[in-house]
Amino acid sequence: MTTTTNVAQDHATVGAQGDVHGDVYFYQVAADASPETQFAVGVRYLDARMPGEARELIELAVARGYETDEVRFHRLLARLSGRTLRELSPEEDIAALTAICGDMPPLGRGDEWTAGLKAVLRLMGSIGTTDTELAVKQLDDLHPVPRGKVLDHLGSLIEGPLVDQLWQRSIAQARANQLAGDRMDRIWMFFEPDPAGARAREVTPDATRVRDRVLAVLGTAVLLYAMGVLGRLLLQQGDLAARAAFVVAVAAGAVAMANAVPWHFARARLRAGDAVFAPPRPRGREAPGRGFARAVDRLFDHYFARYVPYGTDRDTWLEQTAGIRRHLRDELVEIYREQSVTARQIAWLVRHLVGDVRSRWENDTLTAYRAQLRTPLRVRAACLAGTAVAVVAVIGWVVPAAAGAAPLAGTGSALLAAVSAVVAVRTWLRIGTERRRVAADEAERAAKLRSRQEAHRRWKAKLSRRPTDAEMAAWLECDRKLLVDRMLALYRLRPSQIIAHTFIEAPGRPRERARMIRGPWRYTNYRLLLFLLTDSGVRHASVDLDFRAAQSRPTARMSFRFDAVAAAHVQGLAARQRQTFELTLVSGEHIEVEVTEPPTTDIRAGEDVTTLSRVAVDASGLTHTLNVLEGIAAEGKEWARHQRARTEERLTDLAATVKGLID
């Protein structure tokens, strides 16, 4: 036999942030849950290939009096799932199966679950016989749902010719279901986080200070007083031209002021808009490498580099949008910077914003605000003309006439009017511009928020097709079965020649991960360790699985005798530790792989570390594999014979009990 050393510690990583989906009812069982609910959640665990958790919940439901043919069907599947007869424990499994069948009432016609239960019992009753035709026919006649479950969970159970027939049916089902449910277009959604809600930066409140308002009122009051003195002097002096000029100056000043406010606002708004596109200044200190702000930086860098407008040079695009890229990044960091939001949860918004910038670039509307804020010629002309007329009228007629009537009072009032006018105009311009700025910002924010909310709705609608955890488990099971079939063909083995086959599902690298509340992590890439046990020894294969692409690549193969196994154990069995499987051969060769990650992060309400650790181990296949390999390490090549001897007598009793139900 050829031997290949396979040490996998380079696949270890220092944890990875994952996404936890918020369907709290999929695996959630309240303390006061009904037995029906306990059973339903148990079935979900079974469908997700976690038979240990399924057994516990289904047994609880049965203990509370909930027992139907559907319950009995799933109860048997949970007890037998994924194991061969030689792997069943006489003290626990076979004794439990015998008790279940012994307490079972006579079966009538019933529904599809009754038919499924009869088929399972028929398969169990065929143990040790060659009369398998009726069992196969009964299985083929089942409703597709129970038939699929039997093939999924009991394909390895029976020995002899029947197992080959069941295996071929199971493989045909796996090929049909591997890409079912629109897998290739939906599986990526499972690894997308639940998106954070749409937000927009709050409008900066009106910055007008009390001092500004006081100055505006005082300046206006002083101006009115000074103008009143000038007007009284002109009335006393009696010069009609000066009086007319005074009236013209007041009217022209009012016109100039009325047009100065929108002009001043438009210029301020234009400067603010241009500042967004100005090249950003270097930061004094970069954001931490693993922080939220740095992750948002990476998102903007990625999507701006990816969403290049048609016909535009990438470097030109990145250079000319550096300012708006920094502006948008700073906004998102400001409004989402909190512990409960990750950068991945706002990736949808980054894509939306970058797509909007690209669209406006392609439509040549990126700087459309400049045309929108261009002050009309009539406004500028009215402001300038009004100012000029007022100044000329005051200097040319009003001041000379007032000074002539009362030199001291006239000159003093004119100077006071000039100073107060400057103060009043500047403060009223600032106040008026700020009011318009707040109104414009609120309108702009409302428009941004509507656009972002619509983008959020579209993304949520797209993610509504996210697969369930059971679908993810079913696809993974299909990948695993097809891989086993591929290895059987490679080693030229029939299913009936396999004493047991075990899998360990370890996280691959690189990877993304996600899970449902109380569910196991699902990974984009897996490291699968397959062990095929035959009478002549063990066949091992290590495979890298790209789960999203449904593609696998064997990376190592190894064959060894039973007595070549020196030790099999797991490091880190505590709930808060990383769990690593280690298999050591007598020759010193070593297989090591990280199986589960410590579930100490991303804990949600209703979860606890112990349960999450147990679920992760159950889903990984670690317990099953460890039990088999520990037995081999302890007993060597005698393990298979001893295991058969341990179960033979109890299997005969079980077969007799089952036949009493189906005959």
Image: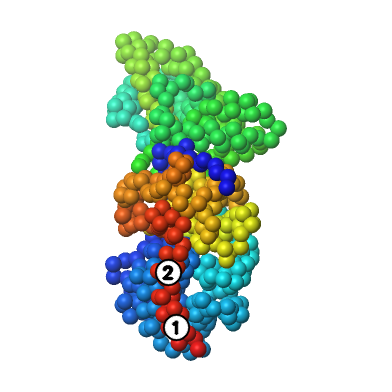
- Which mark, residue 159? none
Q: Is residue 554 above or below residue 69?
A: above
Visible residue check, residue 72? no
**To which residue does mark 2 refer?**
645
Q: Is residue 163 above or below residue 604?
A: below
Kindly identify the residue that appears in the image at 37 percent across and 48 percent down.
570
Q: Between residues 649 and 158, which one lies in front from this camera angle?
A: 649
Kindly identify the residue that appears in the image at 38 percent across and 83 percent down.
102
Q: Is residue 97 above or below residue 190?
A: below
Kindly identify the residue that appears in the image at 31 percent across and 76 percent down.
63
Q: Between residues 281 and 507, which one lies in front from this camera angle?
A: 507
Disc 2: CA contacts within 10 A as few (<14), some (14-19) or many (>=20): few
- Helix, strand or loop under label 1: helix
**To which residue does mark 1 refer?**
656
Kindly identify the residue that appears in the image at 53 percent across and 22 percent down.
279
| Contact between labelled residues 2 and 1, with CB atoms less than 8 Å apart | no
Q: Left or right of 143: which side holds 36?
A: left
Disc 1 versus disc 2: distance between alpha carbons?
18 Å
- Residue 423 on image: x %, y %: 36, 21
- Residue 531 on image: x %, y %: 51, 54
- Helix, strand or loop under label 2: helix
- Quadrant of res 23: bottom left
Q: Between residues 320 and 187, which one lies in front from this camera angle?
A: 187
- Residue 607 on image: x %, y %: 33, 56
Q: Left or right of 332: which side holds 62?
A: left
Visible residue check, residue 318? yes
